[in-house]
Amino acid sequence: MDWKPIRQGHTPVYKQIAEWMEQRIASGEFPPGSRLPSERLLAKELQVNRSTVVTAYEELRAAGLVERRHGSGTIVSRDIWGLARNRTPDWKRMAEAGLFRPNLPLIRQIRRDTQDSDMLDLASGELSPELVPHEQFRRLLAAGDFPCHFGYEHPQGNPELRDTLVAHMKTWKGIDAAPSSILVTAGAQQALHLVVQCLLQPGDAVAIEDPSYCYSLPLFRSAGVRLFPLPVDSEGIDPDELLALHGKHRIKMVFLNPNFQNPTGTFLSLPRRKRLLEISAEHGIPIVEDDPYSLTAFSGEHVPTLKSLDRHGTVLYISSLTKIVASGLRIGWVVGPRTVIERLADAKQQIDFGHSIFPQWLANRFLSSEWFPAHLDMLRRELAGRSERLVCSLRESFGGSAEFVPPAGGIHLWCRLTGEWSENRMLAESVKRGVIFVPGMVFGSKKGFVRFTFGRPPKERIQDAISRLAEAYRSVCRQ
């Protein structure tokens, strides 16, 4: 087979394969009713991942060119020329034209690859199963004293959970809040969606960190807002750069992850926090503080959130239990002015009629129990150990080729790999070796970086994962 996809091209590899197969079908090489090569065989011939061929075949199926038959493989449609009387809607075109934008193809590819149970996962931003309090959950469930009804819950979330969140934020984060100023959401990401959809309009100027997890989210593109980057250095963003952006573009809102930031792991310094809040209050620029990691400081020291320093009500605060308890609970929350919370709650009710009572009950019982402090201590120790193992492994396997600052909390390490290398090619080579990570280009403008997440893989497998990554890196650098 002479044809091979161009890995450095602008068109995703799966689309190149789909277009190439479409040409072969149109030329009659694969006539109606014939069977296409198996996904595994074609992947081997083209030297790509099987999941890439699966996606390409799905493109052909969505276009009506092929059919997937259980036990028979992928068959060229007998009606590719439109001779039948019944017509299938152009689902592919409709899916691409929707207002809600899809994730980046690379993000979708990474998520498919992480479903492989044999893959060493340095990409997923969630905790490994051994860091989740399964035994405590089991005891709470076994107690059998679930007192709640199974009807629709309060639009802002279960009142008892919101009372508990008030105490939780006061004790652990120094934030004063009232139950009426809290909206419970399905994780922090739903909170971000609600804020963007309800408080911004198409064309509004929004500032985000660079690099930032926000770059990987399609919600800003879906809303039609304009994004302006704020470079992140060792102390976080420079507030005066926000001031300069505001003078040029009238920034409507700024989104920040100031505590062990995703992906860099940096911590916005206290002087910059104070200056940022001054600018926010002086110019009326709302700050959305996304804070999933402040309780993961390896030292156990209190981390001052922006919201705890806010004296003028300019900060909307978002947090969740995803990174400190369990992602599957889907418990997040927003703290803000009552008018904003009521607006967001109304939108959430239109979407799902309020959050499910069962995870709210479990979250409330766990947060208010004696188990939570002990769990948090365990989590910090374990994450610190995993971080140290990752740092040692990088130094051993990469030497001076890996440049990074060890994180003091969170679950991410931001690493620059020196030399000339391709992020796409290295990702492909690492997947071949059974390891997955997220290339830095997903998070913004910086090139030559990777994000390693150490919260997901087993501690004892981290060294093996980095050793395999080093092999992939040397292979790419030689090419």
Image (cartoon, grey):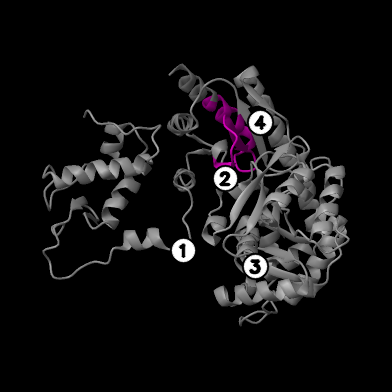
Residue 88's spot in the image, x, y percent?
24, 66
Secondary structure of the residue carrying tag 2 is: loop
Please indicate whether residue 182 sits to the left or right of residue 225 in the image.
right
Mark 2 closeness class: few <14, some 14–19, many ≥20 residues within 10 Å? many
Badge 3 is on which residue? 359
Q: Is residue 319 above or below residue 39?
A: below
Residue 277's spot in the image, x, y percent?
83, 53
Which mark is drawn over residue 419?
Answer: none
Q: 444 or 459: which is nearer to us?
A: 444
What kind of residue is marked 3? Pro
Callout in the foreground (2, 3):
2
Q: Disc 4 vs disc 3: Cβ atoms closer than 8 Å? A: no
Mark 1 closeness class: few <14, some 14–19, many ≥20 residues within 10 Å? few
Name which of mark 4 and mark 1 comes first in the sequence.
1
Residue 234's spot in the image, x, y percent?
76, 34
Mark 3 closeness class: few <14, some 14–19, many ≥20 residues within 10 Å? some
Q: Examine the image and state in which quarter residue 368 appears.
A: bottom right
Q: 433 or 155: which is nearer to us?
A: 155
Q: Examine the image and state in which quarter residue 411 appears.
A: top right
Q: Disc 4 vs disc 1: Cβ atoms closer than 8 Å? A: no
Callout in the foreground (3, 1):
1
Residue range of the region highlighted in magenta in the rendering? 442-469
Badge 4 is on which residue? 390
Residue at 21% x, 54% y: name it: 65
Badge 2 is on which residue? 124
Callout in the foreground (4, 1):
1
